[in-house]
Amino acid sequence: MKTEQLTCDYLIVGAGAVGMAFADVLLHETNANILIIDKNAKPGGHWNYAYPFVTLHQPSAFYGVCSKELNRGVIDKTGLNEGLMGLASGQEVSAYFDAVMNETFLPSNRVQYYPLCEYKGNNQFVSMLNSKHYNVTVNKKIVDATYLNTNIPLTHTPSFTRDDDVAFTPVNTVVQMIEGFNNYVVVGGGKTGIDTCLWLLENHVAPHNIHWVVSRDAWLLNRKNTQPLDDFFFHSIGAQANQMEAIAASSSIEDMFDKLEERGVLLRIDKKVRPSMFHGATVSELELKALQTLPSVVRQGRVKHISRDKLRFEDTTWSMPDNALVIDCSASALTNLEMKAVFDGDTITPQTVRAYQPVFSAALIAHVEAAYSDEQQKQMLTQVVPLPNRDIDWLPMTAAMLRNMQIWGEDPALKAWIYHCRLDGFSKIVHGVAKDDMQKMQVLGRLKQAAAPAMQKLMIYIHSLKASGQL
């Protein structure tokens, strides 16, 4: 079969949230021609395979692409997110990215989109439908928007084995499997496990019929502190000031986490259990209270094998309840924790340059590519913020984020771009504070005063962790 020749300025591999956010900025800030290839039939990446009750964990107001609102503009009036900004469902997010592609990208006549295609390297890709080969002449750069490699329950291979007669389902197909069981065993302590336990509770499953298998407890973020509205200023910006003060006032890493919890920056499900994990999962206070009603939380480490009558762990077993459905929520969302340079010759590899915000990060990286010509300056402006896994990973993540924010703040043009970027979330409510609003000015003063001492304390802790081989 003859290879078709194509030409573009930027070849973007991956039409997930990161690839879409990157392409959107290029489209609106340059005259570049863009070619996007993706394995999926529709844009949106892992959202194409989302479980039916998934929602964003952060407000929809700062998710998606810069040029198109995702937020429904409402405060939730019911449910466990009541009183907070709306969280788009998986179906809404999928439809949103489809609309961005078909209503913004393709009508521009500067975006070529090849779904159901697999990139083979060396500027070549192949159709998964008919095996047609394509070779691309790339005038500027290749953008690898697949590097973070989101893992999902539907397609991942569990780390445990199981007997064939176990009633078992990935969370993606739990709705089809749910009928006829007395008990539900949820395997996985991360965001997906949280979502599944909350979904069962909201559907009137009694707490004692839900058994949550948690290999590691996690520190969680309070969603009230992530609301990009002026009405939440004292929660969102106040939490940032509290965070800096807690770090600066701490006497040890353990004391720092205690103070972060005391100041409302971090949450945990069980006060008696010391978390050893941090993935950045966000919960509302109502969701936290609901999770705390679960009497059966199994904390025995990682599951090794599942049979109908027991779960086997490394050093012990746990007896399975009668007539139980096992729901697999054990997939780790981001599997590629290794960092590499964002800008490296003719390749751009988007990664997080601000914690918790991969789409903002992708948009900022695209803007830096569009607005700056010096490669060394591009690298300085886009230093990678490492993805967290363990509790102690919170420290280098936070230090890297503070470093980047300081560097960005010293660049007036970039600072102005961030202010106008809808994916940023908080710049507008900070800059909108009136000089005579003494209460808000006091919060900003606290934040500014504690920032440098907090950074110094973080560097001391990080140095000690590296010296002991923990980082």
Image: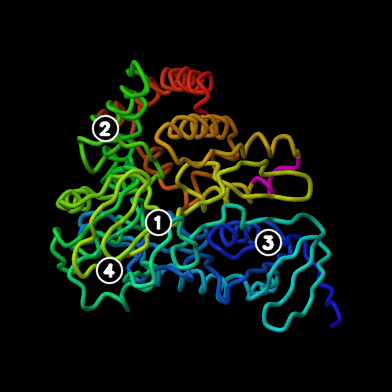
Q: Nearer the viewer, mark 4 or mark 2?
A: 4
Residue kind at label 2, given as amino acid type: Glu
**What whole-number distance in Å separates the C-alpha atoms at marks 1 and 2?**
26 Å
Residue tagged by mark 1?
330
Check whether the beta carbons of the residues at disc 1 and disc 3 lie within 8 A of each other.
no
**What whole-number distance in Å separates the C-alpha atoms at marks 4 and 3?**
41 Å
Residue 370 location (% of width, % of height):
69, 50
Residue kind at label 3, given as amino acid type: Ile
Residue tagged by mark 2?
261
Q: Earlier in the sequence, mark 4 or mark 2?
A: 2
**What whole-number distance in Å separates the C-alpha atoms at marks 4 and 2?**
35 Å
Is disc 4 surrounded by few (<14), some (14 to 19) or many (20+) residues within 10 Å? many
Is disc 2 surrounded by few (<14), some (14 to 19) or many (20+) residues within 10 Å? some
Q: Earlier in the sequence, mark 4 or mark 3?
A: 3
Residue tagged by mark 3?
12
Q: Is residue 323 above or below residue 195?
A: below
Check whether the beta carbons of the residues at disc 4 and disc 3 lie within 8 A of each other.
no
Residue kind at label 1, given as amino acid type: Ser
**What whole-number distance in Å separates the C-alpha atoms at marks 1 and 3?**
30 Å
Q: Residue at x 46, y 34 (%)?
A: 393
Magenta residues span 368-373
Q: Quadrant of residue 314?
A: top left
Q: Earlier in the sequence, mark 1 or mark 2?
A: 2
Q: Secondary structure at mark 3?
A: strand
Q: Earlier in the sequence, mark 4 or mark 1?
A: 4
Residue tagged by mark 4?
325
